[in-house]
Image (cartoon, rainbow, N blue to C red):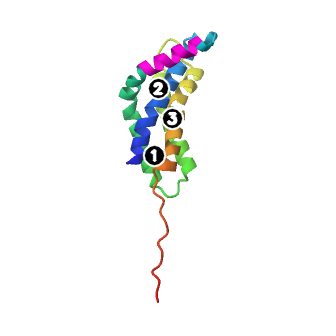
Amino acid sequence: MKRYLIFAAIGPFIGGFLLLLMTTYQSGYWTETNGGEVTKLLVVFVKSLQYNYLFGIVPSLMFGAIDDILMHVKRIAPVVRMLLVGAVAFVGAALTYASHGSESGSVQFILYGMVGFIPGVITSWLAHKYAEELHAPAQPASQH
């Protein structure tokens, strides 16, 4: 259960910020960066945070389910699992966002794919670090 809470709490937060950052970059807004522009970006992020969770919680939980399924496959190492979850999230985000609008190409595909990849890997790593139960080897009963 902790795994899904990690994905639901952190995934939309990071993904929403990255989506705002990529959209801002793609629009050409970052030609001159100063403190005022960064403040505007953070204000927009805080105001749009509720929508990040509204539209991002279901995909985050889906990636959490993929991570949970892969966790039960004993032959898959945690790093490989993190990369697999990130790859699925990359494809999902890239197909969702990159093909829309007047500009589409490999740069947009990669930038919008990173919107899924980065939160997918980070949340999978956090789930591995904090949500997995450590199975201690069973102690044999002492015979006296």
Question: Residue 74's x, y, as percent?
Answer: 49, 58
Question: Residue 120's x, y, as percent?
Answer: 50, 37
Secondary element under disc 2, as helix, strand or loop, is helix
Mark with earlier residue (3, 2): 2
Secondary element under disc 1, as helix, strand or loop, is helix
Q: Farthest residue toward the bottom?
A: 144
Mark 1 residue type: Asp
Q: Nearer the viewer, mark 1 or mark 2?
A: 2
- Choose between 15 and 67: the one closer to the eye: 15
User: Label 2 neighbourhood size at 10 Å, few (<14), some (14-19), many (20+)?
Assistant: many
Q: Residue at x 47, y 55 (%)?
A: 73
Mark 3 and mark 1 residues within 8 Å of each other at the beta carbon = no
Q: Residue at x 43, y 44 (%)?
A: 66
Q: Which region shows up in magenta?
A: 36-47
Q: Which residue is mark 1?
A: 67
Mark 3 and mark 2 residues within 8 Å of each other at the beta carbon = no
Q: Which residue is mark 2?
A: 16
Residue 85 — which label? none
Q: Which residue is mark 3?
A: 119
Mark 2 residue type: Gly
Q: Residue at x 52, y 57 (%)?
A: 75
Is-magenta flag for residue 42? yes
- For the residues labelled 3 and 1, the Cα–Cα distance comes to 13 Å
